[in-house]
Image (cartoon, grey):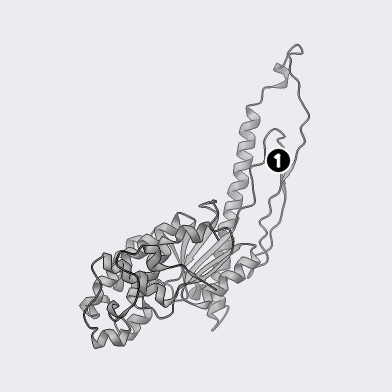
Amino acid sequence: MSPSNHSNSDSAIIIFDWDDTILPSSFVDRANAEKLSELPQQFHNLFREIEQCTEKCLAAAAKHGEVLIITNSDEGWVNYSAERFLPNLIPVLKNYRVISARTRYENFYPSQPLCWKAAAFAHEVNEHFCLLEEASTMLERECSRVSTDSVPDIDMVSAGDDCSLSETSISSAEYSPGADDVLGFPKSNQALSSPYASTPAIVRRIRREIISFGDSMEERTAVKIVSDQLSAQPKSVMFISNPTPSQIIGQLTMLTHHMNFVCEHSQDLDLEITHKQADKCAQHYLSKRGLVQQEKPSIFQRILGAGSFSSLGGGEQGASIDEEMGQFQLC
């Protein structure tokens, strides 16, 4: 399947998870580290690479829509953990909204993290598209007013001129957000008609796309639930669970490379990255950066699952990045 040619930067809302999607939280927990300096030195460069890969991936996504980070961790955790492990991301994160689904919705749905994510998705998506539709309506009215102001006064047209006024039918421009009752959001459905016969309606139904990147079934399920209730197109890419720092790098690099495909594809998508793809893409990226570990992994590395790439199979050094990374696994 090939992607379509459409690309409306306002039509999509793109949601990233944080833990084990950007920050290798499981790895940090296993290492019992409170900050980067408590990890062995050989991992410091990998965390610096995660910062760079994250910045590039977020920027690539931002070309296609509004980018959010929605986490089930507590309010403030994203900045707190970034300061300790990914400090160079602090100024980058200021460009994107970060939402704690847990802080907002845990009281409403105790011990139900899926509901936290779904509620946060629903609120942000509904708000995003309502604002777009309001802006589109205002734009139509303004353009209609400007167009009407430019029409000559009928009194200025003389009877002798070879011109006449033809009848023009006035058609209604459908304005139908189609937002169902989602976790407390009322269904909104109304029609607007332009009083200006000479101006074509420019309001179109906003193409709704919800794109989710994360490592758990919570994101994958939430995007399907909310897309169905808000009449939106769901797209999700599921990352691997409990990734190593190098696998985080591989996944972010792979996603950045395929961002146009994911965001511009004309149909629903439900994809996942395999361990093999994450490892091979990390190997390709880190070898170019001169960071591939060729020595025998230490006991610490073996315990944390961050061993040498030398044991991996894979393409030749001269293989293209597409050959190295392969394609997403269809679910």
Q: Quadrant of residue 142?
A: top right
Q: Nearer the viewer, residue 221 or 331?
A: 331
Q: Nearer the viewer, residue 50 or 266?
A: 266
Q: Quadrant of residue 154?
A: top right
Which of the image's four quarters has the C terminus? bottom right
Q: Nearer the viewer, residue 177 or 1?
A: 1
The mark tally for this picture is 1
Q: Quadrant of residue 319?
A: bottom left
- With 36 as the anchor, is 208 left or right in this view? right
- Residue 173 spot, x, y in % from top left: 70, 45
Residue 308 vs 12, above or below: the answer is below
Residue 39 vs 290, above or below: the answer is below
Asked which secondary structure carries label 1, the reply is loop
- Residue 182 spot, x, y in % from top left: 64, 68
Instruction: Name the outermost residue toward the top.
Output: 160
- With 298 as the anchor, is 238 left or right in this view? right
Which of the image's four quarters has the N terminus? bottom right
The amino acid marked with disc number 1 is: Ser
- Residue 263 spot, x, y in % from top left: 51, 59
- With 77 as the anchor, is 165 left or right in this view? right
Task: Using the rendered image of the protein, determine whether residue 234 is visible from the camera's viewpoint.
Answer: yes
- With 80 as the anchor, is 201 left or right in this view? right
